[in-house]
Image (cartoon, coloured by chain):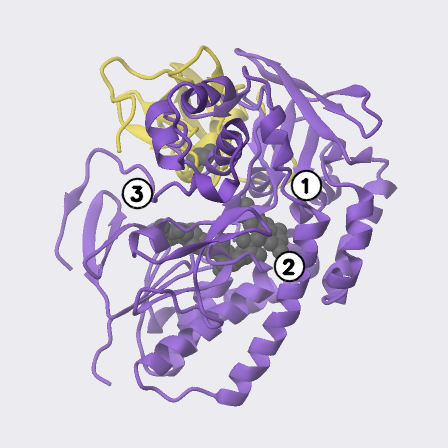
Chain colours: A purple, B yellow
Amino acid sequence: MGQSRVIVVGAGPAGVRCAEVLVAAGIKPILVDESRRDGGQIYRRQPEGFTRSYPSLYGTEAERARALHQSFESLRSRVDYRPETLAWNIYDRQLHTVSAGVTKALPFDALVVCSGATDRLMPVKGWHYAGTYSMGAAQIALKSQACAIGRQVVFAGTGPLLYLVAAQYVKAGAKVAAVLDTSSLWKRVRALPKLAARPRVLLNGVSLMRTLRGAGVKVVTGIEPVEIHGSDEDGVRGITYRSQDGATHRVECDAVALGYHVRPETQLADLARCEFRFDAETRQWLPTVDQDGRSTTPGVYLAGDGARVLGADGAEIAGKLAAWALLEDMGHPVPDAERAALRREREAMDRFRQGLVEAFPWPAEQAARLPDEAIVCRCEAITAGELRRVVNQMGACEANRAKAFSRVGMGRCQGRYCGHAGAEVVAAAAGIALEKVGRLRGQAPVKPLSMAVREEQE
Amino acid sequence: MTGRFVRLAETGRAPVRFELDGAPAEALAGDTLLVAVLSNARSVRSSEFGDDRRAGFCLMGACQDCWVWTAAGERLRSCTTVVEEGMQIVTTQPEGSWAKVA
Ligand SMILES: Cc1cc2nc3c(=O)[nH]c(=O)nc-3n(C[C@H](O)[C@H](O)[C@H](O)COP(=O)(O)OP(=O)(O)OC[C@H]3O[C@@H](n4cnc5c(N)ncnc54)[C@H](O)[C@@H]3O)c2cc1C
Ligand code: FES
């Protein structure tokens, strides 16, 4: 093959493993990542000058983290690695990137998007107060900056990260005021057969609970968050939740980490005109991919949590499978036996993923109960009441119309943190199925660019 | 005023001096600007759609809730910018700068 122009977006587990397979086949991909360093979310590296050990940073995943970082180091001279570079648009088979104020258009024959995930959020009244952070943010503060987000931190929401990050805080010496899970213990027990598909991960989960219990942390399941209390000037002061028996309880704190598992970052797939389908299980729109990550747009592949949330090990596998799919489509040989084995391994992970979805369900029903004065869009302080008004008075029952009228989803986060909940609010107010609300279209630039950008030719 | 974030480890790094709303402030080498500001103060900016102060939300460059400005009027995303010696940071939006840009 001549010089195939192959670009990989994302240097997390999926992107690094993908690049590795491409390099082994004699291709030198361009590897674009917005971060300063490789590793992605879970294997995020601390800045130079920090000295914590792998076990203290990555716990049970220390060896996997080290292996991924080492693979990346050995690839470095054989890929065209571009850190601190945002991929902000895809148009006419060119990937548009920006780095240090310079934009470039990179033509590609094949593109693998390994863009990872961000926290999935359900609003709660008062979540706009300073001191409310996403679950991922709480983890990043610790992992990459050795900080806690507050003196008394409440972890609220649901999902595996809820217990993981709370336990990481405890181990690092932070004060955890409470862990409040919207899912019930019963749901977790019922999901056990599926979760048993990955015994090691399940056991890790159990040991997190033990860490929290050992530290005397209050853990309450089956709750519904009612309100985060605070003041405009000073931010968070406490949180009130309703327990299963209907009683309300207040916990004092100066920070709340909030999250409901994660959602794929699909803007680039959208800009590449990939088709999406509604996933009824998780109540969201996901890009359509085949078992190896081929999207519906020829030459565009999607791997890792950016296509479907399978976690870090699943992302490594998906990265390899996508690379082989790409190579196969370009006429290269691929190792059939190894591929078949990885596909099987991924099936077990998918079963585990389903278990997680059932154990820690997205609390869709909360959207209908959000009080009118609760802010849905943190960016522009737009309330649930305003969103309901555009549905009831203006008949805007489709996501993009409701966005145009209410501006929910138009702010600076571009719907990342309000999009899913906003759609639930619209569906409930209109009395229609979530699927009928449709999905917010991704728009370029995928993140705000600074005003001073100039264009350069490659 | 006390800071919002609490340092749990890695406190042996070299100090970095910067200016926060005109007053001298100290951070550590390798801090993001967000951590530098929030280890000295309770928030990094005001919401332009309400009266409330904000302190970032995602820490991963996705929400844009952590913008600060330099004294010269440049906008910085504080969670993905590293603090530098001598930076002059303001947490209120300078007059005439853009509220929102695409
Ligand atoms: C905040 C957070 C914390 C998590 N913590 C854990 C954890 O502790 N344990 C666990 O098992 N799982 C965790 N997860 C799940 C985790 O995402 C996966 O396990 C794993 O990191 C997925 O790997 P990936 O390669 O698909 O994506 P990621 O590791 O997320 O890597 C994606 C990379 O793509 C880059 N990128 C994305 N969009 C662009 C763009 N437009 N331009 C340029 N670069 C871009 C990002 O900078 C990032 O480096 C976490 C997820 C989130 C969101
Ligand atoms: S805190 Fe979200 S972009 Fe900085």
- Amino acid at the residue labelled 2: Arg
Q: Secondary structure at mark 1?
A: strand
Q: Secondary structure at mark 3?
A: loop
Residue at left offset 38%, top offset 40%: A440
- Amino acid at the residue labelled 3: Gln
Q: Which residue is mark 2?
A: A353
Residue at left offset 58%, top offset 60%: A310
Disc 3 residue: CB within 8 Å of ligand 1: no
Separation (CA) of disc 1 from disc 3: 29 Å
Q: Is residue A320 above or below residue B73?
A: below
Q: Which residue is mark 1?
A: A158
**In the rendered view, does A377 fall on the left or right side of A357?**
left
Residue at left offset 50%, top offset 45%: A118
Pick the residue in front: A39 or B24: A39
Same chain, labels 1 and 3? yes
Q: Which residue is mark 3?
A: A443
- Amino acid at the residue labelled 1: Thr
Residue A223 visible in the picture = yes
Q: Is residue A266 above or below residue A4?
A: above
Relative image position of residue B93 (x, y in whole percent): 33, 17
Q: Chain of mark 2?
A: A
Please report whichever mark, 1 or 2, sits nearer to the chain's N-terminal start. 1
**In the rendered view, does A405 fall on the left or right side of B65?**
left
Res A453 label: none
Residue A42 visible in the picture = no
Relative image position of residue A29 (x, y in whole percent): 31, 70
